[in-house]
């Protein structure tokens, strides 16, 4: 249900800062979305990741229109993307792909059928772009999971704008 500002007829809502602060109370895992156009390899830290369906296996990631990843995923020739669930030892990679880059050689890249993935992650998914949904200043990419692998390592968590670990 949405409320309407009675003076302007516009929909009332929370401010972007209030929205960010409120949603910061939701603890999430940290993922790095990866893709390539065959020449450029990119990664982007994302906490806006969700499992959508078991049958068929679908996930969703949200990408800001200002992100380099958005420009890459918007290309029709880019049909697949990776989702890498970071381990508790990979804070530096979250920072690296969130715009605070460290040395590129510190990224443990590996390829699965040409798609770049992050080694040492708790889990990796290879997804085919299934549906693209415009949503405000972001685009939602629904991915059909074609490949997955995982470990039993502890994940990196994000809560109130800080990293955390289990236990």
Image (tube, grey):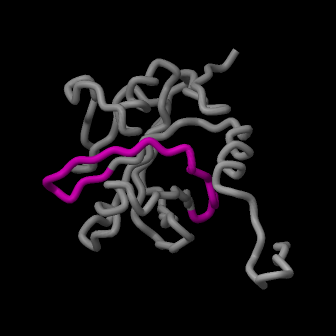
Most extreme residue toward the front is 7
Placement of 72 over or under 150, stated as above or below: below
Q: Residue at x 55, y 24 (%)?
A: 152
Most extreme residue toward the left is 39
The location of residue 159, given as percent across then percent down, is 66, 32
Q: Is residue 43 magenta?
A: yes
Quarter of the image with the C terminus in it: top right
Q: Is residue 126 left or right of residue 159?
A: left
The location of residue 108, given as percent across then percent down, is 28, 28
Placement of 72 over or under 100, stated as above or below: below
Q: Is residue 128 left or right of residue 42?
A: right
Q: Is residue 127 left or right of residue 140?
A: left
Residue in the foreground of this view, choosing between 77 and 5: 5
Placement of 161 over or under 17, stated as above or below: above
Q: Is residue 87 magenta?
A: no
Q: Is residue 21 left or right of residue 122?
A: right
The location of residue 45, given as percent across then percent down, is 44, 41
Most extreme residue toward the bottom is 9
Q: Residue at x 74, y 59 (%)?
A: 14
Q: Quadrant of residue 160?
A: top right
Tally of numbered tags: 0
Q: Quadrant of residue 54?
A: bottom right
Residue in the foreground of this view, choosing between 2 and 129: 2
* Magenta range: 35-56
The location of residue 68, given as percent across then percent down, is 31, 55
Quarter of the image with the N terminus in it: bottom right
Q: Residue at x 49, y 45 (%)?
A: 46
């Amino acid at each position: 249900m949405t409320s309407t500002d009675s003076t302007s007829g516009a929909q009332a809502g929370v401010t972007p800062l209030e929205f960010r602060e409120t949603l910061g109370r939701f603890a999430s895992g940290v993922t790095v979305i990866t893709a390539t156009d065959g020449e450029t390899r990119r990664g982007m830290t994302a906490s806006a990741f969700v499992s959508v369906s078991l049958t068929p296996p679908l996930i969703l990631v949200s990408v800001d229109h200002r992100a380099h990843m958005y420009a890459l995923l918007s290309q029709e020739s880019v049909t697949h993307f990776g989702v890498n669930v970071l381990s508790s030892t990979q804070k530096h990679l979250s920072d690296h792909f969130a715009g605070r880059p460290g040395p590129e050689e510190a990224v443990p890249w590996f390829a699965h059928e040409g798609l770049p993935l992050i080694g040492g992650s708790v889990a990796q998914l290879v997804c085919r772009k299934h549906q693209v949904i415009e949503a405000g200043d972001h685009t939602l990419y629904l991915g059909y999971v074609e490949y997955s692998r995982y470990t039993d390592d502890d994940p990196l968590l994000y809560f109130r704008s800080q990293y955390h670990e289990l236990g």
